[in-house]
Amino acid sequence: MVRRLAGLFDLCILDSFPSAHRSHPSIVGFPQVLPACAGRSVEREVRRLDEIITVAKAPHVIVLGGSKVGDRLESVKMLIRTGRADHVLLTGVIGNVFMRAQGRIKSPLGIKHEDEAVAKAHALIGEYPDVFSTPVDVAVDHAGRRVEMDVRELDRDDKILDLGPKTVRHYSRLIAGAGTVFISGPAGLFENEQFSFGTKSLLEGVASSIATTIVSGGHLTSALKRYGLIDKIDHVSTAGGALVLYLTGQRLPMMEALEDAARRH
């Protein structure tokens, strides 16, 4: 397919950093048969990340939320192993998976490949017992109202939609003492004002921190704009998985394809 289409083009410009960790034909195929270079946004992102990696200092605090459980589990393991995660603060669906692994959520979460994800989370807790923090209180929806409760009080039918105030205070203290903060994925259903407390509070904590700060992903980028905080963050990226892999020192398929093309052409 790549060879068939290549005749229509003179040059390949790769300018989607959020896709840099994917080995798709459109990313790694065309640079094999056409002169190729990075676009301006990829160039800016890589330059800025390289600057941040150079000055990043411990303790490294990672705040992970959102719903992409599989990607998050692999990412956090690599971040810890490469010394990029001294504290991992868990929120969102990934936080629920770890609480399930701890036995603090008793009923099934109803997510894909749940047993496998819970088993991986359990293994990570066993391997790195002092790294992970999980919520102690949460917010659920009861008949259209926000109700805050201890995690131990959850009923089978309760759906966690946000962090509670005790968890936010604990996480905010760890963020305030960090040298580098990386946050990816919202803490809850922030689009609903009733359940925006956790996401907004954590972002405000990151924005007021003296640490080097990185915010990752489209949802949090939108939240930063909504709360007027985007100018207070050192680096904001719509990339998720690609950004995490780059921070761990992994070679991204897009970068390898561009380097190979530069040598050939």
Image (cartoon, grey):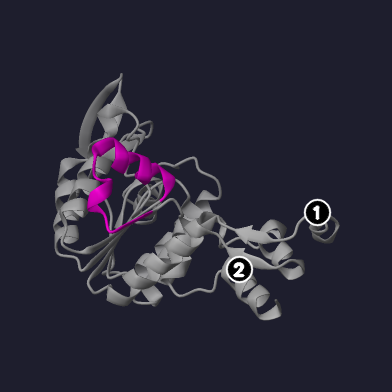
Marks 2/1: CA–CA distance: 24 Å
Crowding at mark 1 (Cα within 10 Å: few <14, some 14-19, many 20+): few
Residue at image mark 2: 253
Which quadrant: the N terminus?
bottom right
Where is residue 217? Give x, y as percent: 42, 50
Farthest top residue?
A: 143
Q: Which quadrant holds residue 194?
A: top left
Give the image location of residue 78, x and y in percent. 44, 71
- Side of 263 where 242 appears, left or right: left
Q: Nearer the viewer, residue 227 or 127?
A: 227
Q: Which residues are magenta?
A: 217-236
Q: Earlier in the sequence, mark 2 or mark 1?
A: 1
Q: Outermost residue toward the right? A: 4
> Which residue is more in the foreground, 178 or 230?
230
User: Mark 1 sits on what residue?
Assistant: 8
Residue at 68% x, 65% y is: 28
**Quarter location, residue 209:** bottom left
